[in-house]
Image (cartoon, rainbow, N blue to C red):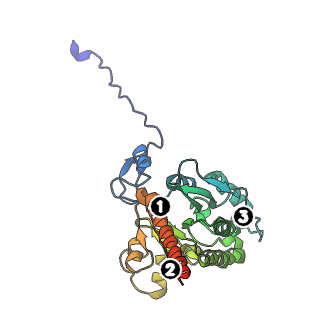
Amino acid sequence: MGWFKRKEPKIEKKVKIPEGLWVKCENCKEIIYRKELENNFKVCPKCNYHFRISAKERISLLTDNGSFKELDGELTSPDPLGFKDTIPYKDRLIDNEKKSGIKEAAIYGDAKINGADVVIAVLDFSFMGGSMGTVVGEKVTRAAERAMDKKLPLVVVSSSGGARMQEGMFSLMQMAKTSQAIGKLKASGLLYISVLADPTFGGVTASFAMLGDVIIAEPKSLIGFAGPRVIQETIKQQLPEGFQRAEFLLEHGMVDIVVERRELKNTISKIIDILISSKALSENSEEEAKNGR
């Protein structure tokens, strides 16, 4: 009579995985445990791909704990052109502020890196692609001026698609403005370290990003003026493998060093120690030579 007994269906328990627990690497397409990724400075443990990080994460990574003091954090764009594309520019700014948690695509202030006082400015790609409008240009300029006033090294981390089209000529003017400020900083004998993260393009590359006394890039970062597709269509030639990647630029003398994210803070610290010490030694030697005469 067992033939006629109803078999109870097997109930499979569905395991509910919390949303956002895993991350897919954009480079190798492997699935990574989010906590493992965060513990590894947001660098893929399988292929070493450096994920983009926010300006606040970058500052936390590079500066001593609790040492960063933001300046002019309230600055926002005045929308000089009253620009509108699919939505008004003012609404776009509000949307990006909500998405990124910051008021503009740049943050700057005073900080310490392994005990050394610096002025640091960081661009955030999550705010309108890190594009340089009037506020970004103003903050980079003020960072350079503060470094001059306090006689401190300046560190700027760039991650940007270039000039901000919604501000037209006002945006393009920031290239000259920031370049002039950096020029004055360097003429005063102060150190400027430029860090290029993925991606750094357009007017940012054509101005302050490439003016560093030392130019550092993160591995595999895309760096250039126009994008590779635009260049290829213009010159009608196949571009070499790895074109515009940090390693390609290092080979061709456009950057000085490619540094893993986990080593970035210590590398910047060593550069500051070496160059500041050598400058002090040189000044002492000159003073001794004058006194000897």
To which residue does mark 3 refer?
Answer: 89
The answer, for residue 226, to whether it is visible in the render is no
| Quadrant assignment for the N terminus | top left
For residue 154, which quarter of the picture? bottom right
**Residue at the location (49% across, 65% down)?**
272
Position of 252 with respect to 281 (left or right) is: left
**Residue at the location (67% across, 75% down)?**
174
To which residue does mark 2 refer?
Answer: 230
Amino acid type, mark 2: Val
Position of 293 with respect to 255 (left or right) is: right
Q: Marks 2/1: CA distance? A: 37 Å
Where does the image place residue 146, in percent across and percent down from the top left?
A: 67, 65
Discs 3/1, front: 1
Where does the image place residue 115, in percent across and percent down from the top left?
A: 52, 54
Q: Is residue 234 above or below residue 28?
A: below
Where does the image place residue 225, in percent across and percent down from the top left?
A: 53, 78
| Quadrant assignment for the C terminus | bottom right
To which residue does mark 1 refer?
Answer: 269
